[in-house]
Amino acid sequence: MTESELNPAQMLAAHIKRELGRVLFGQEETLHAVTLALIARGHILLEGPPGLGKTLLGRHFAALLGGRFKRIQGTADLMPADITGVHVWNSRTSTFEFQHGPLFADVVLVDEINRAGPKTQSALLEAMEERQVSVDRESFALPDNFIVIATQNPREFEGTYPLPESQLDRFALSSPLTYPLREAEIRILETYNLPDSQSRREPVVLEPLPEGMLDNARAGLKDILMNEALTGYVQDLVTASRDSRQIALGLSTRGALSLARCARVEAALRGGAFVIPDDVKRVAPLVMRHRLVLSPDAMLDGITAGAEISRILTLVPVPH
């Protein structure tokens, strides 16, 4: 398929894959998830151990969007004002002036989010949902393309706090960040093995997204049809997650919307004119895994959220 035959969403995905593929190796599934989140105007949670290039991804992703990048390190003593900003007294003007925190950026990487305390985690809720920050009864708008890329360590790591369900539900999707395959890791070693490597300290100059490409990709979603049968299929999956004995907390209405939106984006990236069940199945693990809370019995039996999602996808009838 030539470039002229690609729809706007496919052109966007090809650009992201080509440019970010210059600095991030062996993480194609993660790049696909980030593309889904960007077009769907959602936030993404990356789950996995440290040292796999999450900061590298966030820094260059911001450069690709032509926006500002800020990194927030999750720690136990991180306070809400450290990320939202504070009013500071200006003695020259005899007024309080608001000093913007790191949330006021196009791409915000919250590294090790589950090392921050619950009070600080809750400060992200308004920003992620309303795309604004309220401080001292005054609201401040965030950038139009504001997106949070958060990383989470495995729960068994020392010094981590479980993310509250309301926080997890704000992420449109999650993606497990796994160790790269041998060939990809060898390429990483060959590229970044010098102690003074400039490519690790300074972003590689990437070609930014052409003006209007992201807007066109989002606008093109209106032409992707999702008929009543597919909407009912999404609802049946949501209901099955709520009725499962293995799940204590199933998918919320916000989660159902994310599943439908991401399925529509997946159809566009596939080059389809309408959503098919395979589009829903493709994005279901990304949208559902972090939202499902397993029952105590299921956890004792060693059942995982991924296994339960697979069971639900097998049991729920697929519309014809």
Image (spheres, helix red, strand yellow):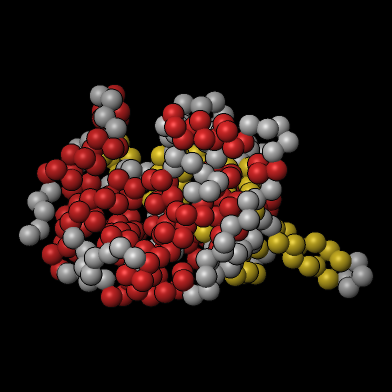
Across and down, in percent, residue 247 comes to 26, 39
Q: Residue at x 18, y 43 (%)?
A: 312
In the rendered structure, the answer to whether residue 237 lies left or right of residue 8 reads left
Instruction: Name the residue rendered at 56%, 50% in the picture.
Output: 58
Is 272 left or right of 149, judged from the image as shown?
Answer: left
State the image coordinates of residue 153 (x, y, percent, origin top left). 50, 34
Q: Is residue 314 above or below residue 106?
A: above
Looking at the image, is 40 positioned above or below residue 60? below
Please count the marks in the image.
0
**Residue 78 in picture, x, y percent from top left:** 66, 43
Viewer-proximal residue, 99 or 60?
Answer: 60
Camera-side residue of 260 and 297: 260
Res. 23 in view: yes
In this rendered view, identify the residue nearer to me: 78 or 258: 258
Quarter of the picture holding the C terminus: bottom left
Position of 309 relative to 8 (above/below) = above
Q: Residue placed farthest to the right in the image? A: 92
Q: Quadrant of the N terminus?
A: bottom left
Which quadrant of the structure image shows residue 218? bottom left
- Left-right relation of 279 to 125: left
Residue 124 can be seen, yes or no: no
The residue that appears at 26% across and 71% down in the rendered structure is 224
Question: In which image quadrant can residue 132 be found?
Answer: bottom right
| Residue drawn at point x = 49 percent, y = 41 percent | 25
Q: Position of residue 154 (x, y in %)?
A: 46, 31
Residue that lies at the very extreme toward the front in this rendered image:
2
Q: Is residue 16 above or below residue 112?
A: below
